[in-house]
Image (tube, helix red, strand yellow):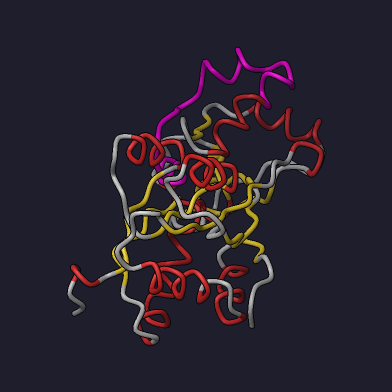
Amino acid sequence: MADLRLSIRVMCTLGLRGLLDEVTPALEGRGLYFAPSYGATNVLLPKIATGEIADIAILTNEAIEGLIEHGTLAAGSRRDLARSSIGIAVKAGAPKPDISTPEAFKHALLLARSIAFSRSGASGIHFANLISQLGIATEVAGKARIFDGVVGQLAARGEVEIAVQQVSELKLVDGIDIVGPLPEALQKVTVFSAGVFAASTRPAAAGLFIDALRTGHIAAVMRKQGLEPIAGPR
């Protein structure tokens, strides 16, 4: 087992947790041992603001750029890793609603008896805005479960009919069926990026870790995890 004191410390969005879990052996095979902590970008940002540091942050591209501008992350260290779409899931074996068009999606939300989405994640923030745009915020609010975490678990346990989150986060959960992404006209694609902390004591290792996440082998795993890789070095 690697010495955690020598591991690369990574503060990472939940959207890439499944990816890092799967590629851990490949990264460790390259000598890139790491100690991750996971959370929604808007959960990790306050921790960083109060002084918590690591070697690498993997968050939304806007958050990474903001941390670079603030001087928390090293200038020039941002690397875009993957694009992520929002989707919905139901308990495994349950009927899958039609979400093929904006109108069908709206109808599915109105018919559902219960819906879960995240409070602070990029998907949850977009969904909250979306139901307002669709004119159904009041109806959905009355049957919603909103919290920070992997909302697909509620669908797996049968506590809600529909779970809304990044597809890559839904893929973390056993016992659900992913219905598909939101209709294109309602979709919000999030770019996840990485940056190196200016106070990192292992900036070279952090850079190698980020470069490893942009290789062809990792790109194949990203697609499996519901992410669209952004081209990097081969």
Q: Observer-nearest residue: 114 or 163? A: 163
**Quarter residue 9 falls in:** bottom left
User: Which residue of the protein is positioned furthest toward the bottom in this rendering?
Assistant: 29
- Identify the residue at image location x=60%, y=29%: 112
Residue 97 place in picture, x, y as percent: 68, 41
Q: Report the number of numbered marks.
A: 0
Q: Observer-nearest residue: 112 or 139? A: 139
Assess whether residue 147 is covered by the magenta stretch: yes
Viewed as shown, does residue 53 lie left or right of 133? Answer: left
Residue 221 place in picture, x, y as percent: 56, 73
Viewed as shown, does residue 126 lie left or right of 56? Answer: right
Q: Which residues are drawn in magenta?
A: 130-155
- Identify the residue at image location x=41%, y=46%: 153
Viewed as shown, does residue 48 lie left or right of 77? Answer: left
Residue 187 vertical placement versus 81 (above, below): above
Residue 87 place in picture, x, y as percent: 63, 46
**Quarter residue 44 falls in:** top left
Quadrant, the C terminus:
bottom right
**Quarter residue 4 falls in:** bottom left
Viewed as shown, does residue 201 lie left or right of 219? Answer: left
For the question of whether residue 92 can be seen, the reply is: no
Quadrant, the N terminus:
bottom left
Residue 88 vertical placement versus 196 (above, below): above
- Identify the residue at image location x=79%, y=44%: 184
Residue 56 place in picture, x, y as percent: 40, 59
For the question of whether residue 197 can be seen, the reply is: yes
- Identify the residue at image location x=48%, y=39%: 70
Assess whether residue 22 is covered by the magenta stretch: no
